[in-house]
Image (spheres, rainbow, N blue to C red):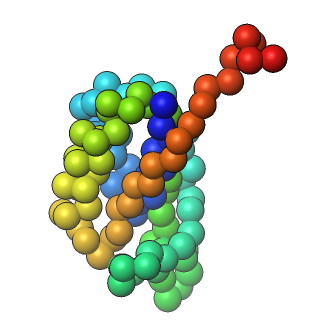
Amino acid sequence: MKAVFISFYQAFYDEVIEVLDKHQIKGFTSWNEVLGRGSDGGEPHYGTHAWPTINSAIITFIADDKVKPLLKDIHALDLTAPMQGIRAFVLQAEEYTDKDV
């Protein structure tokens, strides 16, 4: 199982959800107002007068075989607005259950 963390300009929320839906990824947690700046020359998203835009973020936990197709479509979405800096990060994850106690 993998955790996929996606950070993106908040105007792309619906498009990111469409990508999740395309891959039948139902479970996720989202944050609506995330501040930051990317490392590849994208515009800062600080929510200030000088830099008024804000990011959002989503984390989802998915089976390993869904990761590459999801990342491919997230990357394609990023290419539609490269200065906005849609990014995805993948981490190893383990589900905790009662039998783990």
Q: Looking at the image, is 89 positioned above or below residue 16?
A: below
Residue 15 visible in image: no
Q: Looking at the image, is 77 positioned above or below residue 40?
A: above
Could you tell me residue 62's position as x and y percent?
A: 44, 31
Identify the image quadrant of residue 88.
Answer: bottom left
Q: Residue at x 24, y 31 (%)?
A: 22
Q: Looking at the image, is 30 positioned above or below residue 88?
A: above
Residue 74 visible in image: yes
- Left or right: residue 67 versus residue 61 is left
Could you tell me residue 16's position as x and y percent?
A: 33, 46
- Work out whether residue 79 or residue 100 is closer to the camera in this orientation and state it: 100
Could you tell me residue 47's position as x and y percent?
A: 54, 74
Q: Residue at x 18, y 63 (%)?
A: 80
Could you tell me residue 96's position as x and y percent?
A: 68, 24
State the quadrant of the C terminus.
top right
Residue extending furthest right?
101
Q: Residue at x 33, y 55 (%)?
A: 12
Q: Looking at the image, is 15 positioned above or below residue 1?
A: below
- Work out whether residue 93 or residue 18 is closer to the camera in this orientation and state it: 93
- Left or right: residue 77 versus residue 9 is left
Q: Residue at x 34, y 39 (%)?
A: 67
- Work out whether residue 66 or residue 53 is closer to the camera in this orientation and state it: 66
Q: How many marks are shown on the rendered structure? A: 0
Residue extending furthest bottom?
50
